[in-house]
Amino acid sequence: MGTTSLSSMHTVRSLADHVGGTVLGEGADTLVTGINDLSSALPDQLSFFANAKYEALARASRAAVILVNPKDSSKFSFTRIVVDSPSQAFGKIAELFAPPPIRDEPGIHPTAVVAPDAVIGEGVSIQPHAVIAAGVRIGARAVIGANSYIGEQTVIGQDSRLYPLVTVRERCIIGNRVILHSGAVIGADGFGYDFDPKTGRHAKIRHTGYVQIDDDAEIGANTTIDRARFGKTHIGQGAKIDNLVMIGHNVTVGPHSIIVGQTGISGSTSLGSYVTLAGQVGLAGHLTVGDRAIITAQSGINKDVPAGAILSGRHAMPAREALKHEALGRRLPEMLERLKALEEQVRSLTDSKKANS
Amino acid sequence: MGTTSLSSMHTVRSLADHVGGTVLGEGADTLVTGINDLSSALPDQLSFFANAKYEALARASRAAVILVNPKDSSKFSFTRIVVDSPSQAFGKIAELFAPPPIRDEPGIHPTAVVAPDAVIGEGVSIQPHAVIAAGVRIGARAVIGANSYIGEQTVIGQDSRLYPLVTVRERCIIGNRVILHSGAVIGADGFGYDFDPKTGRHAKIRHTGYVQIDDDAEIGANTTIDRARFGKTHIGQGAKIDNLVMIGHNVTVGPHSIIVGQTGISGSTSLGSYVTLAGQVGLAGHLTVGDRAIITAQSGINKDVPAGAILSGRHAMPAREALKHEALGRRLPEMLERLKALEEQVRSLTDSKKANS
Amino acid sequence: MGTTSLSSMHTVRSLADHVGGTVLGEGADTLVTGINDLSSALPDQLSFFANAKYEALARASRAAVILVNPKDSSKFSFTRIVVDSPSQAFGKIAELFAPPPIRDEPGIHPTAVVAPDAVIGEGVSIQPHAVIAAGVRIGARAVIGANSYIGEQTVIGQDSRLYPLVTVRERCIIGNRVILHSGAVIGADGFGYDFDPKTGRHAKIRHTGYVQIDDDAEIGANTTIDRARFGKTHIGQGAKIDNLVMIGHNVTVGPHSIIVGQTGISGSTSLGSYVTLAGQVGLAGHLTVGDRAIITAQSGINKDVPAGAILSGRHAMPAREALKHEALGRRLPEMLERLKALEEQVRSLTDSKKANS
């Protein structure tokens, strides 16, 4: 775990070549045996600089070489590889030192329970104890993780990967190359009841719809996406949803949107494409959020959001206004003092006026 | 998935008869082949209007017919079915077009592991790979979903349904007609430690109590309800709990309460009946919340809540006061300007007084 | 469930002896048949008093005897056992009346799937339908719960306990005496993408690192801890993490830290030792939180926190300042009224000055 496999030798220069970068500074022939972050890197490791906050860490780093972009490069004198995207180049170099990815052997494990009428594509891997219900169709090369459950008539696209212990309920549609992380629950009933004042009870509303997740979307661990009351809850192409997120019934998440951990979206709210919801955001139901809108962490949104807006805070203020607002909030003690001083002065002025009249 | 089964033909008039409603406007004989929301409905589909926000959508809808209540009906001229509860009538009509519910065959799947001394009622369905530990009792017609786990001596009532991948730990009591959604964890240890200053370590407090969930309650996907330190954590009859909610040890949730997604209730807090906690609310421990209290979304509550109160915000203000408070918060920039202007005027008055004296 | 096993008879005096306490008040020979909280205790049950808030409940309690500390004892006249730590003594007495702990028989259940090359220690219990992938090592006496999954090359230490339905992905390191509660997901991919402006798509960043959880840590139900991009996400010795918490990639949680339910920590943030994060807290990424810092419930932290700080609220104010701030916030209506009154007075002063000049 702590060591990295060294299938071949890498020097600073050979790594620069590998990512199409240029070496600046001394030590182009130094041997690099691994990768690390700026603060932990050893003298034979490569690191990368991509966040201005870490400038001091970069200067103090013991790394053999650091990936930097052309703009930042001039600030530094240490040995560096200049590339347009240090983060992407780092990813490419990380692959050289990374343990090989886990391979899931194609085939149905003998302990898996697969309904006789399920249609299983070529090269599919169904791991131990997975349960595939009646009428399911699974596309070529998909992986169904151990102890996962796929409900009746659900469709899983090609090359999709369900990690262990995923639940997809009946009649859902999962596209191609979709990733579902462990503990995700797709297609549980939406949270809807009709209150009957005569009996004082909440009557369950049947949710006969489904969940559709389009190609290339990724859904985080223990995230829940509820099925629609009717029609569908819809996650668009390439949308990326983090862990422990809750997506209510009939919600639409537009293509390529990003939803960070522990965010919740209430029923029937619709997000455009390229929307970003930061962590722990809450959206009320029946809202429309326009394309490319950004909601900052822990915000609460209860009205529609126009395209491109950047909103913050509990009451959906534009992020700049929210910052100003917050700064003013901090001036309350001072404002109260100024108010008191004024009252004193005005009292004195009024008294002297009375005395003069 | 996109189509609906048409076991028989339905017209606007026959659907109105089905829900005891009256057709107004033209087209009572139009054939209806499905249901949809106002904005997506096609000319052969039925929709419903129940939220004033959607009045424009209703007017623009292509639906063959729209369910409306008597009060709203006069606003519209489109073809409509007038019923007391459009939402409930819609649910009833939705059933006509819905796919048939999934049937779980009674019986114990051969891959399920059931302890020899477990008592399994008549007509129970135990799905593949479910694990039923020693001393468990399961009431008639209950369904235990695939890959679920029922711990030692736990009791599950009649007609209850545990979806796949549910965990119920040992010695819990689940009532009749209870629904537990996938990923729910019932009876994990409460979060409690005694800090030992001598060793600098947190010593685990054993939680020997259990969880009791009364009849007709419903627990959402990936929600956790911790077992009591001693005695019980208690979910009352007909309570409805959404996804990703956390209920701490020794909490009581009163009958027919509603707890929306991602809310957390700390240990030993007690809710009365018909309480509503909206989404992402947090309650501190050892509190009492009175009957029918309502806490709005994202609020934080750290003191007792009287019956019937409607509270908002981080500091448990009455919702109306919170709204006023928020509005005042927005006036801070203006208040600061007025303060500055006053200071200028008072300075001028004081100067002129000095000059005059 | 409602009854307690009575393997032997206990009196108030014998229980006092058992915890090294002193009986004050009458009834030292009363038979005690169980334990309960102050408000529910019956006349043959023992309870404990440890929270000043419950003084009235203690006075009104029907308990046969109540555990109190020496300081509180003088306030009361009811029958009591005086001990230094009523909570710990209660725990010790609770054991006498508690149902016996569940015993997990050592051995590998025949339905478990264990890779031929997995190394399983002495006395390990692998429960039904657990799946142990290739290259896994499990230390002596560990328990792997039903329907759990342990990924390739992961190491589980001695005496650790994984409850049912836990997922640990490949190449993670779990220490000795670690407890993982049901639904926990350890080692899912971190949430990281490189946006490619040419294609308008988010490219997944491969996460080749792992998760390391040190000895004596405990991880709550449905909590997720993501694997590192490279290197490790690290949970320190004796750290206690509650339910539904999200720990991002490359996060460090220092030894003996406490993280309460539904808190989220973004990628690469580092916590010192003995840090406390209360419930529903959110921490931005790339932060450093010093030893023994405390963050109160529902706070949002987006800058570094010094050791020992106690911070509150959305903007990381010291807790005292936050309280003052909040109190001032409540005075806004009054401040606005005072501002209006001042404006009126100044107007009048100015008018009279004009009239006089």
Image: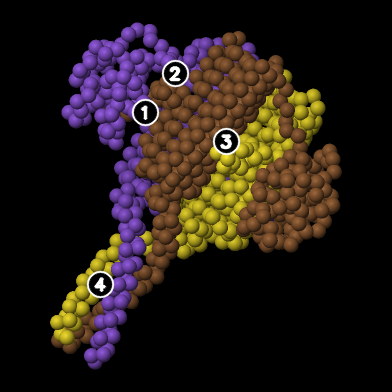
Chain colours: A purple, B yellow, C brown
Q: In front: mark 2 or mark 3?
A: 2
Residue at 60 percent of width and 13 percent of height: C119
Image spot of residue B242 (x, y percent)? 57, 43
Image spot of residue B135 (x, y percent)? 78, 31
Q: Is residue A104 left or right of residue B268?
A: left
Image spot of residue A98 (x, y percent)? 40, 16
Residue at 73 percent of width and 49 percent of height: C21
Q: Are marks 4 and 3 on the same chain?
A: no
Please, what is the three-letter code of the amino acid marked with disc 1?
Tyr
Q: Residue beneath label 4, please?
A: B342
Q: Residue beneath label 1, please?
A: C193
Q: Secondary structure at mark 1?
A: strand
Query: CB of mark 2 within 8 Å of CB of mark 3?
Result: no
How many marks on residues? 4
Which chain's residue wears label 2?
A
Q: Nearer the viewer, residue C192 or B248?
A: B248
Q: Residue beneath label 2, please?
A: A2
